[in-house]
Image (spheres, helix red, strand yellow):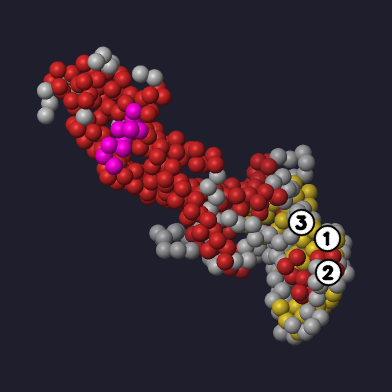
Amino acid sequence: MKFVDVIKTSNSNLRRSKLRTFLTLLAISIGTFTLALSLGLGQGLRNYISSELGQYKGVNLYQVEKTTLSNFSGFGNHDPVLYDANKSPSSANYQNNFLSPSEISQIKQIKGVQNLELPYAVVFEYATSPSGIKYEASNSTYLSQSPFNIVTGKNLTSNDPGAVLISQKYLPLVGAKDINSAIGKILSVTYKNSKGLLSTMSFSVKGVYEPSLIQAPIIVNRQDAEKIANEQAPAGSPLVNFVFISKASDVTDAQIKSNLSNAKFTGRSFADINNTLNNIITGVQISLAAFSGIAILASVVGVINTLFMAVLERTREIGLFRALGSKKRTIFYLFSVEAALLGFWGGIIGILFAFLAQTAINKIAANTFLKGVDGIQLLNIRPSLVVFIIVVISVITWIAGLLPAFKASQVDPIESLRYE
């Protein structure tokens, strides 16, 4: 019997007991549905992280902090830790987490460190639009290595006093109707100094960039950020618990991290952050897929039961096939292909429902809890993922059907013709 004939015959056999086949397909489709959603969720989040951090790939920028900040012994309910006066201060001591001027100078002297930039933490009370409306003004300090997707105007440079970048969503703050008219507009911000007195400062918009999860909506040039940070610092000098560095071209990623570690500092690139986030997502995917596995396991039991019942119901038919010259392997193929087809059709049904759920969930998410988060697609069931899931489900059900198929192939033709 040709393979095409085997498939046609197997499909025809599945339609004999419609209710039993339907219930088996339902169980398989539920397992497929949950598996597709769990993998689609992971893929959607992974794509978003890649789109946000992908532009940082190859960027020569490392975040450096004290190694003690990576030690979370000061947090949580854990076993007692013996005090050691020779060890670095615990991360539970907040003040000791700040980098002192001498430690910042030490980082500059570490072999492979080419450039060091301080992340000035500037706090604006509000920004006032030309119409007098006050807005929140989240911001960050310009970093020379940080990439920006400038949609109009120019990027900041290392020496740009009085200039600022704004997100294209923040056009109302400067009274601009479109991105092109925003260039040269004045951004007026108000902040408090260390004594609690309000001060107002005006910036000229030099460029407008496409917003992202990483970058703040207002990017302040370094000179003005340092000035404001000094005014807001209680001690007259801003405190930081991490700095950004660039490595020299003759030093590898592993070498700069090793040099920092030897000096009791920890350096992380944006690629490390990307990998960490992807590892977290992978863990979530595996956890969700495990729940899907329970439903798939239940469907496997259903496949075995369905085929064993089919063997009993078609014992005389199997005997007739054998009496007419069919080989054992032909009978084996018929039943094993039936099992694979159960997985295939169940997988197709589950994927169709998963696509419907994906459309609905993505639409609801975009209009509710993910509103305002540009570029994110919560669920992303790609074609390659569809093929992978259907193949995996088909293989699983095929394996589940091997035992009933083997039993069917071993039926004695003479005894089976007497079977009632």
**Disc 1 residue type?**
Thr
**Disc 2 residue type?**
Ala
Foreground pick, 32 / 229: 32
- The quadrant in which residue 124 appears is bottom right
Q: Label 2 vs label 1: CA separation?
A: 9 Å
Looking at the image, tell me whether mark 2 or mark 1 is earlier in sequence order: 1
Foreground pick, 154 / 261: 154
The secondary element bearing badge 2 is classed as helix
Q: Can see residue 199? A: no
The secondary element bearing badge 3 is classed as loop
Give the magenta part as a residue range: 9-18
Residue at 70%, 58% (x, y): give it. Answer: 243
**Disc 3 residue type?**
Phe
Q: Which mark is residue 152?
A: 1
Q: Can see residue 10? A: yes
Percent across and percent down for residue 315 are 19, 27
Quarter holding the N terminus?
Answer: top left
Q: Which mark is residue 182?
A: 2
Say whether residue 239 is left or right of residue 84: right
Q: Mark 3 points at which residue?
A: 148
